[in-house]
Image (cartoon, rainbow, N blue to C red):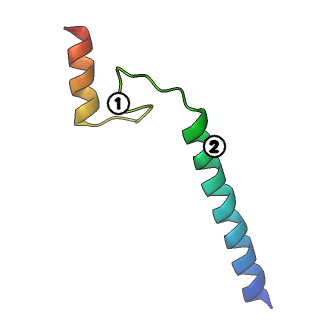
Amino acid sequence: MWQEIAIIIIGIAIIVYVSLKCYKSFTTKRNPNNPCCGCNGCSLKEEVKKKEIN
């Protein structure tokens, strides 16, 4: 019985997590000059910042 409850809780958590990620991806404004769209950072983002400064 407790295993079924644990699986249901995990399933609900997964559904909530996926729903929030989908919501964020559809509501995030896209900037055509920045291909990262809100990424925390990587080498590509650093290159884009360098090009914007120059």
Q: What is the three-letter code of the residue carrying label 1? A: Pro
Q: Which mark is residue 14?
A: none
Image point 64% across, 48% down: which residue?
20
Q: Is residue 21 above or below residue 53?
A: below
Q: Which residue is rendered at x = 33% and y = 35% of the image?
A: 41
Q: Amino acid type of disc 2?
A: Tyr
Query: Local crowd at mark 1 within 10 Å, few (<14), some, or many (≥20)?
Result: few
Q: Position of residue 16 (x, y in %)?
A: 69, 57
Quarter holding the C terminus? top left
**Extreme residue toward the top, this view:** 54
Image-based side of 49 in relation to 30, left or right: left
- Image quarter for residue 24? top right
SS type, badge 2: helix
Q: Which residue is mark 1?
A: 35
Question: Residue 17: horizontal and vertical position, in percent?
Answer: 63, 56
Q: Vertically, is 54 above or below 31?
A: above
Residue at the spot x=74%, y=76% of the render? Answer: 8
Q: Position of residue 27 (x, y in %)?
A: 61, 33
Tag 1, which secondary structure?
A: loop
The image quadrant where one finds the N terminus is bottom right
Q: Position of residue 4 (x, y in %)?
A: 75, 86
Locate residue 15: give its quadrant.
bottom right
Residue 54 lies, with reference to residue 3, above or below; the image says above
Q: Earlier in the sequence, mark 2 or mark 1?
A: 2
Residue sitting farthest toward the bottom: 1
Q: CA distance from mark 2 to mark 1?
A: 19 Å
* Residue labelled with disc 2: 23
Which residue is nearer to you in this view: 4 or 18?
18
Count neighbours of disc 2 (C-alpha within 10 A) and say few if under 14, some if 14 to 19, many if 20 or more: few
Q: Residue at x 72, y 87 (%)?
A: 3
